[in-house]
Image: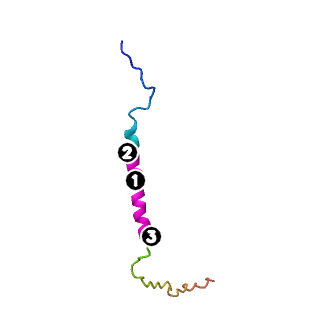
Amino acid sequence: MTDNSNNGGNSNSGGGGGNAGLAFIVGGIVVVLAIVAYFVFSGASPEPKQVDVDVSLPEVSAPSVPAPAG
């Protein structure tokens, strides 16, 4: 007969592998967010660009309507 009982009463043994992977993923996300925050909040932006947008359209006239026959 095989004894499968846990002598220490700890039924949560050997479960640290998933937590280590999760910690690695969360750590990577934190590093990426820190890099993005550095570039957003550092104030070291490239030279400002002058943008001039002209949206005026040429005037279009409607064609003349022919007179009714009769």
User: Alpha-carbon neighbours of circle 2 within 10 Å: few (<14), some, or many (≥20)?
Assistant: few
At a point 47% along the width and 84% down the height, the residue shown is 53
Q: Quadrant of the C terminus?
A: bottom right
Element marked by disc 1: helix
Direction from residue 24 to residue 57 in the image, left or right: right
Q: Are marks 2 and 3 in contact (CB under 8 Å)?
A: no
Mark toward the start of the polypeptide (2 vs 3)? 2
Mark toward the start of the polypeptide (1 vs 3)? 1
56 versus 27 height, above or below: below
Say which amino acid is labelled 1. Answer: Gly
- What whole-number distance in Å separates the C-alpha atoms at marks 1 and 3? 20 Å
At a point 39% along the width and 82% down the height, the residue shown is 47
In the image, the segment drawn in magenta is: 22-38
46 versus 3 height, above or below: below
- Residue highlighted by disc 1: 27
Mark toward the start of the polypeptide (1 vs 2)? 2
At a point 41% along the width and 70% down the height, the residue shown is 39
User: Alpha-carbon neighbours of circle 1 within 10 Å: few (<14), some, or many (≥20)?
Assistant: few
Q: Nearer the viewer, residue 31 or 58?
A: 31
Asked if the stretch drawn in magenta spans residue 36, the answer is yes
Say which amino acid is labelled 2. Answer: Gly
Q: Nearer the viewer, residue 51 or 39?
A: 39
User: Alpha-carbon neighbours of circle 3 within 10 Å: few (<14), some, or many (≥20)?
Assistant: few
Say which amino acid is labelled 3. Answer: Val
Looking at the image, which residue sits at the far front?
Answer: 8
Position of residue 42 measured from the top left corner of the image (x, y, whole percent):
43, 73
- Residue highlighted by disc 2: 21
Determine which quarter of the picture holds residue 36: bottom left
Element marked by disc 2: helix
- Residue highlighted by disc 3: 40
Q: Main secondary structure of the magenta part?
A: helix
Q: Residue 13 has which mark?
A: none
